[in-house]
Image (cartoon, rainbow, N blue to C red):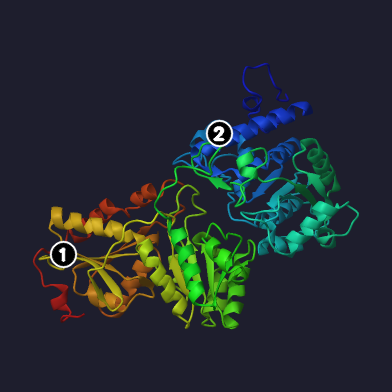
């Protein structure tokens, strides 16, 4: 029996608890439902934080998708997943929005564990068309071509290399129908760049009847558009026509990012792409802290460095503002290059800039750097090119979850020959390390930047061959050497104090500053201690601790090295401090690890210094 609406005191939105109900709704009630959805989004997303602008622009389009297609029998793949909030609402998850992006609560992206309607846990851009290509092939082989495959991709995501590769395959598959719904709002975070953006602009403003030739028809697609993405009825009609074609189709839907919410529509930066907890009708989000973020410190430092060094240029993959490049773009717009959502191209383009005598700084989220590993390895490092990568959101990031934690870079980049990686322990140290990175012209450099506010400075008490000694236990034996990576120095310092005061364990805290490759001074320092404990907010497999342990072994130093880091697992979303504590990377966790590591070691024994003849 078909699901129908019943007389109920519930709001229209509350009554539409699953797509089957939505399909029975009279067309004249859709504008009312759209208004309720927008009000819901503004209230709930501003209460918890999350992606607001993209989802306000998706309301009518998502309604049309679920009225035309029968999810999950028909596959709806959202690219990127942050535009899927309305989809979540229409598939039974409205009540869960009170805990959006909260620990144990609703993910800010599609999640296979949440619903059968979430086919792909998709939060990295430009992938949906490739998923759709594979799904369509599988259904063709299974004789299930009556099950539609729909990829919803933004114009910003369409600039990515994978999207072009997928279009190249899909356009020639005349007997393998895939519907590519192009959600064109002219933006990703910021306005979409490049020739594709220009061609889409021409289609938006000059019309584009299906018979006209354009980029998509030249690739073999049937093209419908442009369609008003805020007219559910019009979108429905076109989607039904597209489905009936039984061949690859592009449906070009024009929407407005932030639609229906004046603060979002008028925000010139990114249409309130994301908000923290906020007053719905006023602010971008949250109470603004007087403390600067690491990202803002980097942005200002780079602009000042560029003023002193004309060879410095910057490269971004569609994320100028989020990675801190705004100040440099304001001062030197001709020296800042946004290549769109195309990380692989960004890195190899930077290699070309370096070959041309410049020093490019590629500002990118750590999680997105994974996508360009081959380019870092073989296009930059193989040629020993002076390219500096600044990895924002390195380590645990928080509410965006497993796809956005920047926890893989240390393990991946530790394998790259000739690459040097710095991890500043405090924001105040960032300008100096950035300057050192730009001054290095013998190969690639990396500077890690966490998603955090700038904390108090941690002064070194001494320096040894480039290693900053942050703490020495006065009058204590050389029991434990703590080697923190970057901002985890604060936890190491707190742990050292607790260990000495409460447990009588003498500690040295050493900050390598440049953590990869391992400074040769560290094995010598390790030889003077009973135990070494490294602390990093990257995967402990193959990271800094593993490299330090290997180097000690290569030098014949038998001091055991215990590596604290993140597990080789996909870590869920949650507050950064909470997730670090769960991984044992806060002060209590370090204390416990040290006590465990020293529990079975003889209290009275020859020191490592004596055993190794006073090395170091």
What is the x, y in percent for residue 318?
Answer: 61, 60
Q: Is residue 400 above or below residue 384?
A: above
**In this rendering, which labeled residue sits more in front, label 2 or label 1?**
2
Q: Tell me if 556 is positioned left or right of 316 in this view.
A: left
The answer to whether one can see residue 402 in this image is: yes
Q: In the displayed orientation, state which residue is furthest to the left.
A: 604
What is the x, y in percent for residue 515?
Answer: 37, 71
Which circle marks residue 43 in the picture? 2
Q: Quadrant of residue 259?
A: top right
What is the x, y in percent for residue 385?
Answer: 53, 81
Q: CA distance from mark 2 to mark 1?
A: 52 Å
In primary-sequence order, the first of circles 2 and 1 is 2
Q: Tell me if 426 is positioned left or right of 308 in this view.
A: left
Quadrant that contains the C terminus: bottom left
Q: Quadrant of residue 199?
A: bottom right
Instruction: Kindly check if marks 2 and 1 are in contact, taking CB atoms under 8 A apart as contact.
Output: no
Q: Is residue 467 above or below residue 91?
A: below
Identify which residue, 610 or 516, lies in the foreground: 516
Q: Is residue 153 above or below residue 437?
A: above
Q: Quickly name the residue at label 1.
A: 473
Quadrant that contains the N terminus: top right
């Amino acid at each position: 029996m078909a699901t129908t609406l019943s007389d109920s005191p519930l709001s229209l939105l509350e009554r539409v608890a699953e797509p089957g109900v939505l399909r029975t709704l009279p067309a004249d009630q859709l504008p009312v439902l759209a208004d309720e959805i927008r009000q819901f989004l503004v209230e709930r997303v501003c209460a918890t934080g999350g992606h607001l602008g993209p989802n306000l622009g998706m309301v009518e389009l998502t309604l049309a998708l679920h009225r035309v297609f029968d999810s999950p029998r028909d596959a709806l793949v959202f690219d990127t997943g942050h535009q899927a909030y309305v989809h979540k609402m229409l598939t039974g998850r409205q009540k869960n929005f009170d805990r959006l992006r909260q620990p144990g609560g609703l993910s800010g992206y599609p999640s296979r564990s949440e619903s059968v309607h979430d086919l792909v846990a998709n939060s990295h851009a430009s992938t949906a068309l490739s998923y759709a290509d594979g799904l369509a092939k599988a259904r063709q082989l299974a004789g299930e071509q009556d099950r539609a495959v729909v990829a919803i991709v933004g114009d910003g995501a369409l600039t990515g290399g994978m999207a072009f590769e997928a279009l190249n395959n899909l356009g020639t598959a005349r007997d393998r129908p895939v519907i590519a719904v192009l959600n064109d709002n002219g933006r990703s975070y910021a306005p979409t760049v490049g020739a594709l953006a220009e061609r889409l602009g021409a289609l938006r403003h000059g019309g584009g009847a299906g018979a006209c030739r354009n980029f998509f028809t030249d690739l073999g697609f049937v093209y419908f558009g442009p369609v008003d993405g805020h007219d559910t009825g019009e979108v429905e009609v076109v989607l039904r026509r597209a489905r009936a074609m039984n061949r690859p189709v592009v449906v070009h839907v024009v929407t407005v990012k932030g639609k229906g919410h004046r603060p979002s529509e008028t925000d010139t930066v990114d249409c309130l792409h994301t908000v923290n907890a906020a007053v719905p009708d006023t602010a971008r989000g949250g109470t603004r802290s007087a403390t600067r973020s690491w990202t803002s410190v980097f942005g200002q430092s780079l602009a000042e460095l560029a003023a002193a060094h004309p060879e410095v240029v910057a490269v971004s993959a569609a994320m100028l503002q989020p990675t801190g490049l705004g100040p440099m773009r304001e001062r030197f717009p001709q020296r800042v290059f946004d290549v769109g959502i195309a990380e692989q191209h960004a890195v190899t383009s930077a290699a070309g800039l370096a070959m041309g005598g410049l020093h490019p700084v590629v500002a990118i989220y750590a999680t997105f750097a994974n996508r360009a590993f081959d380019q870092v390895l073989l296009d930059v490092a193989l040629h020993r090119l002076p390219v500096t990568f600044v990895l924002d959101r390195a380590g645990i990031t928080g509410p965006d979850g497993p796809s956005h934690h920047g926890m893989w870079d240390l393990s991946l980049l530790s394998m790259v020959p000739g690459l040097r990686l710095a991890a500043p322990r405090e924001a105040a140290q960032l300008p100096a390390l950035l300057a050192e990175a730009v001054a290095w012209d013998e190969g690639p450099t990396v500077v890690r930047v966490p998603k955090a506010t700038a904390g108090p400075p941690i002064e070194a008490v001494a320096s040894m061959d480039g290693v900053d000694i942050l703490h020495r236990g006065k009058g204590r034996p050389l029991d434990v050497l703590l080697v923190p990576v970057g901002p985890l120095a604060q936890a190491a310092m707190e742990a050292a104090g607790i260990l000495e005061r409460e447990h009588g364990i003498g500690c040295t805290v050493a900050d390598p500053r440049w953590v990869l490759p391992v400074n040769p001074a560290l094995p010598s320092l390790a030889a003077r201690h009973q135990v070494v404990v490294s602390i990093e907010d990257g995967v402990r497999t193959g990271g800094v601790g593993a490299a330090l342990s290997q180097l000690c072994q290569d030098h014949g130093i038998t001091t055991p090295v215990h590596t604290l880091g993140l597990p080789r697992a996909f870590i869920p979303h949650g507050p950064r401090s909470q997730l670090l504590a769960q991984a044992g990377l806060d002060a209590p966790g370090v204390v416990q690890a040290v006590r465990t590591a020293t529990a079975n070691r003889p209290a009275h024994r020859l020191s490592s210094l004596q055993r190794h003849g006073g090395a170091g």
